[in-house]
Image: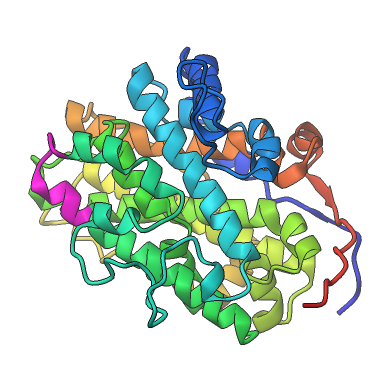
Amino acid sequence: MSQTSSFQLPDILDLIKSFELRTSHWCHSVSLSSENWLCGSEPTEPDADAILSPSECSTLSSTKVGLLAALCSPTLDSPQLRLLTDFLTLLLYSNARILSSKDSKDLPWEVDENGLIGCSSNADDGLDLLNTHTLFKHIVPRVRRLASRVPAGWLARFSLSVRKYRMAQFKLTRDRGKCIIPEVEDYIELHRDMSGFKLIFDVMELVEGVKYPSTYPHLDQNFMKLRQLTEDIISWTLDIYSYNVDQRRGNMYNLVSVLMVHKGLSVQGAVNFAGSMVREAFASFHAIEDSILEPPTASQPTAPLTLSVFSLSWLYKSYLHPLPAVTSHHAPLPREIDAYIRGLKEYIVGTINWAFETEIYFGKKGEDARTFGWVFLEQKDPVVEA
């Protein structure tokens, strides 16, 4: 496989050009108050301890997590936006700590004398589980207060997301210690839980950034598929954008790296492949949206929609032969359904645009990456012997 010094990003921005991009006017004030809380510098609590480490606080402003929250949930009031911003920031640094951990003892979860993660490892309550996390425990009281006002079904979904998130982090750390690089299908399943996107959705639902249309049970499967596709679109896109940083740090748990290893692809070939997966997910998203807007009649049945991205021959063809543009003209949706789909689109368009504003993925060259689409590979960090 030939060495390369650069690669071109897939034009994912073109896929979201029809999505409305909005932000909240609370963005600046919420970002500042969140950063002060996380770094122990709140004017109203001068003796408060910092939640993040000094090195983490030094990078906090450049992450622009407050902007991410404001773009994804632009209609939230200040207290709800603050909770979402705090949660997103804790998730970001939790994942960063996982990727730098050497074994289960370095995990941000409490470990008992038997090596089990979480003192409440058998508890059903996801909030009790989060209380065993060194970062999330600081936000549990606020989440619990809000959770007490919503139907019990929310806590059940959230608890399942927390358990999957915790176990995925443990599995990642264990597999990395054994130098195991998962197959593509296994990586995608693992990353769906480990990324924390399910948790984000649950919290967004809690603060009503995305409100699940529960009065349409016959469409539950469609709504859940849309949510899964939203998570995949964001997850795979961010893996493409983070490849340069990950390869520099030697982190192989990235979709592009996994494709290179198991499909024998070059960097550019793997990026193209991952981009095709994103485009297929977008096509499926639009197809499900259309099926909600225009249900098939008895005389025009439709085959079940296949959401699997593992038809590899199709994927190879798809980035050689672009998908046709999706255009739709429909009758107005019921308000609750329209708000849900719009919320998913705001999550997608907000996250993808934020990726070029934060310094996490492209450093200070986000605008160049957005404009020209080229990424120049950085030199790998030196390996530090244990």
In the figure, 155 relative to 58: above or below? below
For the point 65% across and 30% down, which residue is it?
61
Q: On the picture, is 85 further left or further right than 67?
A: left
- Residue 147 in the magenta stretch? The answer is no
For the point 51% across and 36% down, which residue is it?
49
Judging depth in this view, the residue of 73 and 14 nearest the camera is: 73
In the figure, 25 relative to 350: above or below? above
Quarter holding the N terminus is bottom right
Judging depth in this view, the residue of 200 and 32 nearest the camera is: 32
- Residue 156 in the magenta stretch? The answer is yes
* Quadrant hosting residue 168: bottom left
Q: Position of residue 232 (x, y in %)?
A: 46, 56
Q: On the picture, is 205 further left or further right than 177?
A: left
Quarter holding the C terminus is bottom right
For the point 65% across and 64% down, which residue is it?
100
Number of numbered discs present? 0
Which region of the structure is painted magenta?
148-157
Q: Position of residue 45 (x, y in %)?
A: 46, 22
Q: Position of residue 91 (x, y in %)?
A: 48, 48
In the figure, 258 relative to 165: above or below? below
Q: Residue furthest front?
A: 47
Q: How is the image coloured?
A: rainbow
For the point 38% across and 18% down, which residue is it?
78
Residue 64, visible in the rendered structure = yes
Q: Position of residue 139 (x, y in %)?
A: 36, 40
Q: Main secondary structure of the magenta part?
A: helix
Residue 182, visible in the rendered structure = no
